[in-house]
Image (tube, grey):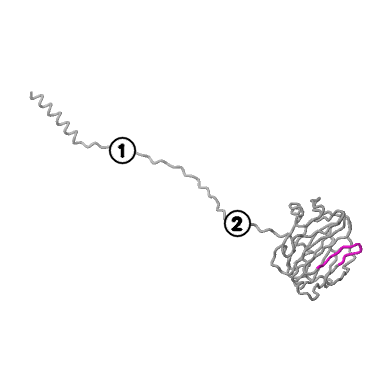
Amino acid sequence: MKKNSFITFLIALILLLASCTQTETVEPEVLPTEIPEQETVEVPTQEPTDEPEVANSPIQEEIAGVLENPVELFHEGVEQMAENMGGQFGFIDVKEPGDGYFQFASGAEGAYMPLNTRLKDFGGDGRRQQAFWMRFMLDPVGNLSFTFMGMGEVVISFEEDGIYCIYVQEVTKEKMSDFQFEPDKWYNILFATDDDMILRVVVWEDGNYENQVSYARDLFIGMDDLYESNWEVTIGFDSNTTLKVTDYSVYSFDNLIQNPNGN
């Protein structure tokens, strides 16, 4: 009986000691997860840009020798004329691209073909100074005229015996030169009027400026409304003739430059 009591006492003691011992909880070690560095790609910031300006064509030396500070308001070359099928010009029998040029061809009645926009209406600041230039070839060689109509009317007429300036308001026809076209050659014409309505016309063989005509005259004959002229250009030529054009431009400028002949 005593032996059993002693064993019972030991078991009770062991249980008591076990209940008093704090169980240490060991938390599992959590290793940090390594996140690989991502390469940062810088996207350049695109700043808003203005619409590109239309660049003016280079000013030819011959034009710069006549017009002080010329500003090109409008230009059409072969490509532009082909795109709109010569739409800046009025009715004529044939308008079509050629080989390195755009061509206007007349039928049996000949041609009287206006440039549909007057010179001031191409832009600029509305100043009186206006100029028109064209590079052309006539096939076959014959009569050709450039009529400029504003508050007056001036005709530059290429005829069999030379070039004439016809001033309708003054009822005059003045011979400018004995200049004659030659077949298969390109020519240039520059028509300009300044702030005082002084007219300057220069005609030259392309690539041979020494073969040229320079003409000047005062258009004012007492009519102040002449200063308000906004020139309309009309080109006339014979029947069954082709006018070949590579370029034409409209300019404003500051002054006419005095040429070596004093005009």
Question: Label 1: which residue?
Answer: 27
Q: Quadrant of the N terminus?
A: top left
Question: Label 2: which residue?
Answer: 49
Q: Badge 2, how many Cα within 10 Å: few under 14, some, many 20+?
A: few
Residue drawn at 10 percent across, 24 percent down:
4
The type of residue carrying mark 2 is Thr
Location of residue 151 (image quadrant): bottom right
Q: Is residue 160 left or right of residue 228?
A: right
SS class of the residue under badge 2?
A: loop
How far apart are labels 1 and 2 at the CA level? Answer: 62 Å
Q: Residue furthest front?
A: 109
Above or below, 1 against 227 in this view is: above
Residue drawn at 81 percent across, 68 percent down:
153
Residue drawn at 58 percent across, 56 percent down:
48
Q: Magenta stretch?
A: 153-164
Residue 148, percent from left and from top: 80, 65
Above or below, 136 against 36 in this view is: below
SS class of the residue under badge 1?
A: loop
Q: Residue furthest right?
A: 161
